[in-house]
Each structure stands twice: as C-alpha cells, then as structure tokens.
Amino acid sequence: MQIIVKGKNLEVTDALRTYALEKVGRIERYFDRILKTEIELSVERNPKISERQVVEVTLFTSGPILRAREAAPDMYQAIDLVAEKLERQAIKAKKKMIDRTHHARNPFKEATPTLAEEEETGPRIVKTKSFTLKPMTPEEACLQMDLLGHDFFVFVNADTEQTNVVYRRKDGNYGLIEPEA
C-alpha cells in the first residue's frame, strides 16, 4: 500500500506522521485491500478561523474511494476527528457490500424491500430531471450556474465538445470536472 503524508503551510514532523498513520491505519481492518492513502495536513492562514488545523484523507480501496476532511484548533484533534469520520464511512461501505452479496446469494429474500430496509440501504433517487446540454465555455457555465442558484452545472464544453461539470467549492471559487481522454 502506498501512503503519502504531505503538509500545506506546515512542516510534517515525525510525531505527526506517525500519529496520522496509526489513526488512519485502523481503517485497514474494514477492507481487503487499500491501494493508496493520501493524508494532507494543513494550516489555514486566516487568523479569524478558530479551527485552523485541517486534515484531509483520501483512501483508494479495491471497492469505494473514501474521503474525509475535518478541522479543529489542534492538529491531533483534527486527525482524531477525521479518523472517526473515515471509520463511520468504512463501516457503512462494508455493510453495503455485505448486504449486496447476501442479497444476491439468498434467492428467497423478499423482492421488494420494506420501508425500514430502504432507509438502511442508503440514498435513493427520488427525482429525475432532463434538459438539453448546450455548448458553452466553462466561464459561461459558471455564470449560468450562478443565475440558477445551483451548486453545480452540467454542460458541453464548446472547446472540447465533451460533457463537463462546473461546481462551487467551499472556498467560494469554482471547480471544473472533465472526463479523461
């Protein structure tokens, strides 16, 4: 397994690295194989933010990709919070994988789930929208997204003629998602 620990606006000490690896390493028991782990420790430069110590972890497993971000006044506390969040995500993902395999193996299981079972299985699609994709630049798509008041917008990129997505980031800027060629 490849593990990357990097710091942003801070020097990653051996103690921090060891603590982060120990806490995040506990997630290994939930998955057969973790391919890669990226841990980013950062300090926000804005002095008005009380929880300036931020930890972001991305786990690339043979199944789902888990990602968590937590902030706290202390880096060790932020690592603890992100480890707890990842553990909850791992338990939920593992439960879903087990439920799917058991459901597939048991042909006598009821075909339509009850309301309680539906709530346990996770998110459901409750609404579907369809619309025409118009060719536009990413800047035009951001403007259209703002006009609609949405957090993301799907469009056809006029330059590449591929479907792209623009989205609003937590920091107020915009992101662009493009498919790989």
Image (spheres, helix red, strand yellow):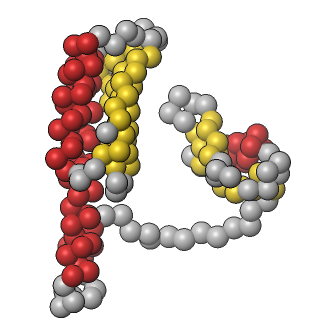
3 versus 114 height, above or below: above
Is 156 placed left or right of 153 in the picture? right
Residue 119 seen in this snapshot: no
In which quadrant is the N terminus drawn?
Answer: top left
The residue nearer to you, when weighing 145 against 138, is 138
Residue in view at x 27 percent, y 19 percent: 17
Q: Position of residue 42 (x, y in %)?
A: 40, 18
25 versus 74 height, above or below: below
Q: Residue furthest bottom?
A: 108
Q: Position of residue 38 (x, y in %)?
A: 38, 33
Residue 70 seen in this snapshot: yes
163 versus 120 height, above or below: above
Residue in view at x 54 percent, y 71 percent: 128
Q: Residue furthest front?
A: 1
Q: Position of residue 147 (x, y in %)?
A: 70, 46
Quadrant position of residue 99: bottom left
Residue in view at x 20 percent, y 22 percent: 19
In this figure, what is the number of numbered marks? 0
Q: Position of residue 74 (x, y in %)?
A: 25, 15
The residue nearer to you, when weighing 37 against 136, is 37
Is 106 placed left or right of 151 in the picture? left
